[in-house]
């Protein structure tokens, strides 16, 4: 490491206590690294008043709104919208899941906690649970970041179905074609 300068930073720009170097208001001017996909910005996702055709039907009174399909790393990010109470599904996670509740509330029959508006839940790989939206919740919307797959199971844990980034992508393509946006509408969410 270089010697310290009078302003507390070293010759290479790092501070003596290993904090980040001060950033200048100058854009990076070097070559772009090879094979780096474009950034993805989906504006207005917290404004839940999307055009109805952007919500992809998943089950009766259940829809998802794609935000990101990462096919190279096997995860997806979407908004899940539910407009009914009761059991949605029983499933096991093959990878970690992050959930941030934007509207309404839900819980798992197997746990004591409730995911309420404004809360965040982390669900570890291997967790098996049964998602329920309680009576009195007219609409539940949650932002889910799902790595790996949902493995739908019966009460004894026997697999009965699978959902992953590829099945979600196929559903979205078919829906967007059907509503006149074209199947390639979904391409903007693929990385």
Image (cartoon, helix red, strand yellow):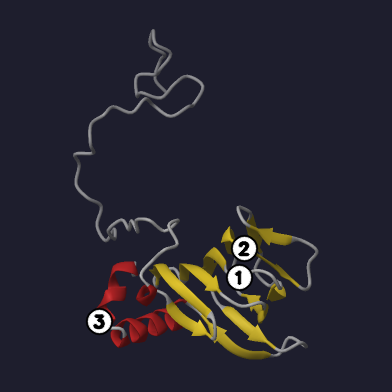
Residue at 50%, 83% in the rendered image: 58
For mark 3, what is the residue? Answer: 182
Which of marks 3 and 1 precedes in the sequence?
Answer: 1
Q: Position of residue 71 (x, y in %)?
A: 39, 73
Up-down relation of residue 76 to residue 37 (above or below):
below
When asked about the image quadrant of residue 186, the answer is: bottom left
For mark 2, what is the residue? Answer: 104
Dot 2: element: loop
Q: How crowded is mark 1: few (under 14 residues within 10 Å), some or many (20 or more)?
A: some
Which of marks 1 and 2 precedes in the sequence?
Answer: 2
- Going by the image, does 163 lie left or right of 89? left
Marks 2/3 in contact by CB < 8 Å: the verdict is no
When asked about the image quadrant of residue 26, the answer is: top left
When asked about the image quadrant of residue 120, the answer is: bottom right
Q: Where is residue 9 in the image (x, y as percent from the top left)?
A: 40, 17
For mark 1, what is the residue? Answer: 138
């Amino acid at each position: 490491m270089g010697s310290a300068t009078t302003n507390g930073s070293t010759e290479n720009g790092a501070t003596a206590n290993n904090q980040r170097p001060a950033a200048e208001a100058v854009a990076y001017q070097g070559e772009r690294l090879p094979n780096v996909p474009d950034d993805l910005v989906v504006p207005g996702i917290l404004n839940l008043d999307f055009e109805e055709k952007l919500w992809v039907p998943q089950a009766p009174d259940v829809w998802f709104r794609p935000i990101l399909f990462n096919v190279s790393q096997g995860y997806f990010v979407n908004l899940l919208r539910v407009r009914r109470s009761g059991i949605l599904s029983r499933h096991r996670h093959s990878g970690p899941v992050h959930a941030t509740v934007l509207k309404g509330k839900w819980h798992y029959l197997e746990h004591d906690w409730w995911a309420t508006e404004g809360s965040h839940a982390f669900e570890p790989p291997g967790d098996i649970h049964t998602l329920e939206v309680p009576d009195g919740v007219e609409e539940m919307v949650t932002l889910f970041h799902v790595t790996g797959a949902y493995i739908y199971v019966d009460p004894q844990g026997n697999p009965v179905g699978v959902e992953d980034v590829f099945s979600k992508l196929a559903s979205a393509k078919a829906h967007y074609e059907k509503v006149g946006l074209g199947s390639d509408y979904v391409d903007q969410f693929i990385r």
